[in-house]
Image (cartoon, helix red, strand yellow):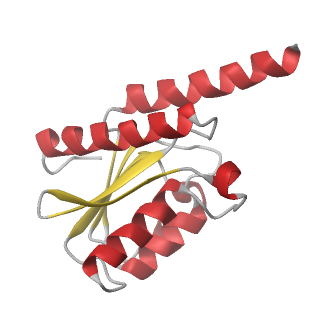
Amino acid sequence: MITENLEADNRFMTEALRQALMAYEEDEVPIGCVVVANDRVIGKGYNQTQRLQDPTAHAEMIAITAASNSFDGKFLHGCTLYVTIEPCAMCAGALHWSQIDRVVYGAPEPKTGFSRFTPTLLHSRTRVSGGILEWDCRELMQKFFAEKRKGAEK
């Protein structure tokens, strides 16, 4: 997929990676997300399903809620969501209802990513770009799960 502004995409994906590192440090699946409007972060989040004991506390859901509160409305027109890993179907559904303009993800998620099921989960006007800082995003996830497997062997 083609990016629209590589410099901005790299900058904001780096912000999403910072969020993912916060998740990693809290022993959460390391996925981070930021929502951007007018070249400014208006919402951010990282996975907190363990901490909040809430299976819906995905990075995207938290960032969408924060951005909606910032906008004082449910629609995220003019916004871009940057997330380190391709959103799942649940998050894609929330993105559909937010009518966000663009979704940018780092690494694809072949098992649970929304495009595995149907790319039409997103709003028909939402543009999608993938592969931004893909290696960094994938590496953090692989490190996390390798550590989990190693811990389970003990």
Q: Nearer the viewer, residue 74 or 122?
A: 74
Residue furthest to the right: 154
Q: Residue at x 77, y 15 (%)?
A: 150
Q: Is residue 12 above or below residue 89?
A: above
Give the percent coordinates (x, y) of residue 134.
38, 32
Q: Is residue 141 above or below residue 38?
A: above
Q: Residue at x 40, y 26 (%)?
A: 135
Compared across the picture, whether 43 is left or right of 60 comes to left
Compared across the picture, whether 74 is left or right of 152 comes to left
Q: Residue at x 59, y 43 (%)?
A: 110
- Corner quadrant of residue 39: bottom left
Give the percent coordinates (x, y) of residue 154.
88, 13
The answer to whether any part of residue 32 appears in the image is yes
Residue furthest to the bottom: 73
- Corner quadrant of residue 53: bottom right
Give the percent coordinates (x, y) of residue 132.
31, 38
Q: Nearer the viewer, residue 125 or 104?
A: 104
Q: Is residue 124 above or below residue 116?
A: below
- Corner quadrant of residue 12: top left
